Image (tube, coloured by chain):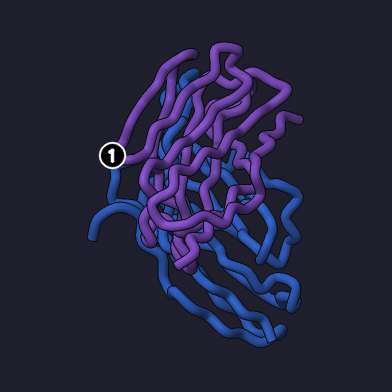
Amino acid sequence: GQQLNQSPQSMFIQEGEDVSMNCTSSSIFNTWLWYKQDPGEGPVLLIALYKAGELTSNGRLTAQFGITRKDSFLNISASIPSDVGIYFCAGPPLNRDDKIIFGKGTRLHILP
Amino acid sequence: ETGVTQTPRHLVMGMTNKKSLKCEQHLGHNAMYWYKQSAKKPLELMFVYNFKEQTENNSVPSRFSPECPNSSHLFLHLHTLQPEDSALYLCASSQVSPGGASNEQFFGPGTRLTVL
């Protein structure tokens, strides 16, 4: 079945640094979603991408839908302590309209 | 209440107990989902309800029994669970158009379940 591969699995950065993470698949996706999950909470949708090549920003976050439709990246600029958490990419498989597949997540740690 | 709410937030139960998790969505969506999230594992989709009909049962053991009485409410009935069922159980909802993509799912805060 379709799978989403996220990298890196975890990141340790200094406050103020920029962050980049990506998500790839061997299959085409028509929608890419990026979620963030804080400890003990449910994932929260950050950015949704619907068109190949689309570049969308949400504050310090920027995400792009890859031209091949098989990848997406998420950048965070000037990281702050509240950026700590797990970031998931997700997308609906081609043969289903009512479910989405999640990557395994990138865990972001910010060093004091 | 706004968004997706789940109760209880924490639950501790013995293996012989019967309990239920409740989810309510206030977004007017027509699809609801149960996910299991264990430590250091990806989100596992358990059940999908689309227009109140179950459209996915992801090989979930029968000790988990979902119920969707209407498009706003979703329950997960638990009985004779095992310690390995301890996890964060997340509910989500989305708006699905027939033949269209569901895309954005909105999650509740989850129920942290511990089975002793």
Q: Residue at x 47, y 14 (%)?
A: A53
Identify the residue under disc 1: A59
Of residues A7 and B18, which is closer to you in this image? Answer: A7
In what quadrant of the picture does the N terminus of chain A appear?
top right
The answer to whether B77 appears left or right of A58 in the picture is: right
In what quadrant of the picture does the C terminus of chain A appear?
bottom left
Kind of residue indicated by mark 1: Gly
Q: Residue at x 62, y 71 (%)?
A: B78
Q: Is residue B73 visible?
A: no
Indicate the chain coloured purple by its letter: A
Colour in which the image shows chain B: blue
Circle 1 marks a residue in which chain? A
Of residues B86 and A85, which is closer to you in this image? Answer: A85
Q: Name above or below for residue B30 compared with residue A107.
A: above
The answer to whether A50 appears left or right of B14 in the picture is: left
The answer to whether B99 appears left or right of B3 in the picture is: right
Find residue B101 and report its horizontal and vertical position in percent. 48, 24
**Residue A80 found in image quarter:** bottom left
Find residue A15 and report its horizontal and vertical position in percent. 41, 57
Please give the count of numbered marks on the rendered protein: 1
Of residues B102 and A101, which is closer to you in this image? Answer: A101
Label 1: few (<14), some or many (≥20) within 10 Å? few
Find residue B93 and report its horizontal and vertical position in percent. 42, 45
Find residue B108 and report its horizontal and vertical position in percent. 41, 57
Q: Residue at x 62, y 59 (%)?
A: B36
Q: Residue at x 33, y 31 (%)?
A: A57
The answer to whether B57 appears left or right of B68 in the picture is: right
Q: Secondary structure at mark 1?
A: loop
Q: Is residue B111 visible?
A: yes
